[in-house]
Amino acid sequence: MNYKILYAIALVVTFAATVGISRVLIPILKSKKMGQKILDIGPRWHKSKEGTPTMGGLSFIAAFFVTIIPVIAFACANMGETLNIVPAVLTGFFALGNGVIGMIDDRTKFSKGKNEGLLAWQKYLLQLVLCSAYLFFMKWSGAITTELYLPFIHKSIELGIVYYPIALILLTGVVNSVNLSDGIDGLTSSETAVVAVFFSFTAFFTGNLPLAMFSGATLGCCLGFLVYNFHPARVFMGDTGSLFLGGLAVGMAFMAKNPLIILVAGFMYVLEAISDIIQVVYFKLTHGKRFFRMAPIHHHFEKCGWGEIKIVAVFSAVTLLLCAAALFLDIMPSLPR
């Protein structure tokens, strides 16, 4: 079976499963009063969203694994991909681990009765342990080396032990940046769908079957969830979903053996984190003044009068342009002639 057919199966089945599971899950979340708490410091019009069910990311996490496990099993049995499938298995566990951390955070919010879950150091410590384990097993299996590929330059540099702290910062940074982007209806799902398309083309051009299956399933998750998450959202993914998608996004970059490319393809994620850091530092240095009207930056544009659909459209369009640049300026020129 052609790997593009497996890609299509992963995409379609995950999309259908996400839609189906979400339809069942949303009433359950409502019955258990798993509604989103809205911070008073946020845009006042967000108050109307209070009570919208959250932790909806459980739907596409379930759909992802219900689809990807049999697809991987079929590839191993029929396409001789057993040796190359290890990075996919490890990345799947890595994304799931991030989803579990998000679920703990979401559950903590409900137990406290407010929009404050795990303390920042608690969440980051759990992420550091998870990312360290991911890097250890990726190196142990031979899926990564201590060489770091530099996008656009088309060269690799040997970093030795320095590779690991850089990789840790990249992994935790991207995962948390994706989490920060989940602030308005459909934004994280839309941006990640575009990033998944980028990794789909990367997989097609390089013949990377595991990456093709993962990117197809990720795209299916995002599109399926958008059915219920597009403005006005009927469900939120919560940290459960956003941390899971963050793990998939940065994990696919490592599967592609091009980890830094996520900083280009996923730059709008990174911009969310940068805007948050600028806001905090500027606030402290100026004793109470704000650089942005509100951070992360998607809220700044809300405060400037942009509607949620416009923000999602513009951010996704910029992501699409950056992904196209990464594809045509890095992925395609680096292929063997």
Image (cartoon, rainbow, N blue to C red):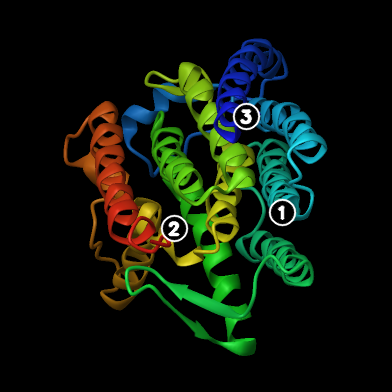
Q: Describe the element under mark 3 as helix, strand or loop.
A: helix
Is residue 315 shown above or below 282? Answer: above
Q: Amino acid at mark 1?
A: Asn
Query: Measured from the top left, where is residue 287 in percent x and y?
Result: 29, 73
Residue 141 relative to residue 187: left or right: right
Please tell me which residue is depicted at 61% across the width and 37% down the height of the picture. 213
Q: Nearer the viewer, mark 2 or mark 1?
A: 1
Alpha carbons under labels 3 and 2: distance apart = 24 Å
Q: Quadrant of residue 70?
A: top right
- Nearer to the camera, 138 or 185: 138
Q: Describe the element under mark 1 as helix, strand or loop.
A: helix
Query: Measured from the top left, where is residue 192 in percent x and y?
Result: 45, 40
Q: Amino acid at mark 2?
A: Ile
Q: Is residue 114 visible?
A: no
Mark 1 lies on residue: 84
The 10 Å Cα crowd at callout 3, few under 14, some 14 to 19, many 20 or more, is many
Determine contact: label 3, label 1, CB under 8 Å: no
User: Which quadrant is home to the N terminus?
Assistant: top right
Q: Is residue 291 visible?
A: yes
For marks 2 and 1 on the same chain, the one whose residue lies earlier in the sequence: 1
Alpha carbons under labels 2 and 1: distance apart = 21 Å
For marks 3 and 2 on the same chain, the one whose residue lies earlier in the sequence: 3
Mark 3 lies on residue: 6
Is residue 243 shown above or below 217? Answer: below
Please tell me which residue is depicted at 54% across the width and 27% down the height of the picture. 220
> Exactly how many numbered labels are in the figure?
3
Mark 2 lies on residue: 262
User: Which quadrant is home to the C terminus?
Assistant: bottom left
Is residue 201 shown above or below 283? Answer: above
